Image (cartoon, helix red, strand yellow):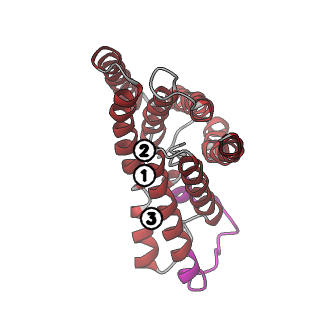
Amino acid sequence: MAGADIARTVVGLVGNVISFCLFASPAPTFWRILKKKTTEQFQPYPYIATILNCMFWVFYGLPLVHPHSILVVSINSVGLAMEVIYTSIFFFYTDNKRRLKVIFWVSLEMAFMGGIITVTLLKFHSHTARSNFVGTFCVVFGVMMYSSPLAIMKKVITTKSVEFMPFYLSLANFLNGVIWVTYALIKFDIYITVGNGLGAVSGAAQLILYAIYYKSTPKNKSGGGEKLSEVQLYSGPQQPLAV
């Protein structure tokens, strides 16, 4: 049992590192926003969605819901802080119309999260019941986040080009899913397994498409300019589902 605990801790630490890289992936987008002092065509929804996802996983990993999940709490707490920073930068540099949208959706998320916390603590009185209730929401939102690459995958197939599907981010998504599934299987956790299993499948599908269409991708003749579509589509890491 001690060996399993050590193995799970080591795998979880590796998962934290990979998940951090995913959370950091929007940094170039926000450096661009800071330099230009405008959000241009970028949208806040990926970051707002990831805030909710991280809040659910942090709550799921707390001792009062699912004990012995400190590594789940740690990486999602970091991710939550980073997504709040991203959203704050967006809020500061965007127009009033989109500021109102940010306020509306973040307020809705906070109210929803508050309701889930209240129901969890008042209605469910065992770790198993609380884990099942909160874990179900984690998986549902995880499925929604991991389905987001479908649009870019369709674009790859129709254009026979991987120009707007970054290889290293696809690889990181795959490795992130695999490492957290491994973590979950050492001491079986159905919710972490399902959520990140979908992430691993999604990442693998992207890598397969990359291998198929890499040679047919036209060379970038613009001198390596920044790809707006790439940055926008991947601006909110499909959270590490983070576990």
- Count neighbours of disc 1 (C-alpha within 10 A) and say few if under 14, some if 14 to 19, many if 20 or more: some
Residue 100 in the figure: left or right of residue 233: left
SS at mark 2 in the image: helix
The dominant secondary structure in magenta is loop
Q: Amino acid at mark 2?
A: Tyr
Q: Amino acid at mark 1?
A: Val
- Count neighbours of disc 2 (C-alpha within 10 A) and say few if under 14, some if 14 to 19, many if 20 or more: many
**In the image, residue 217 lies at what x, y percent?**
57, 80
Q: Is residue 162 visible?
A: no
Which residue is the site of mark 2?
Answer: 191
Which residue is the site of mark 3?
Answer: 152
Q: Which dot marks residue 194?
A: 1
* 223 or 142, nearer to the observer: 142
Where, quadrant-wise, is the N terminus in this rendering? top right
Disc 1, disc 2: CB below 8 Å? yes
Magenta residues, start to end:
210-231
**In the image, residue 233 lies at what x, y percent?**
49, 54
Q: Nearer the viewer, mark 1 or mark 3?
A: 1
**In the image, residue 219 lies at what x, y percent?**
64, 79
Report the label total.
Answer: 3
Specify which label sits upstream in the sequence, 2 or 3: 3
* 74 or 125, nearer to the observer: 125
**In the image, residue 111 lies at what x, y percent?**
33, 19
SS at mark 1 in the image: helix
User: Mark 1 and mark 3: span between their CA atoms?
Assistant: 23 Å
> Which residue is depicted at the point 44% across and 25% down?
65
Residue 196 in the figure: left or right of residue 225: left
SS at mark 3 in the image: helix
Residue sticking out furthest to the front: 1
Residue 215 lies within the magenta run: yes
Disc 2, disc 3: CB below 8 Å? no
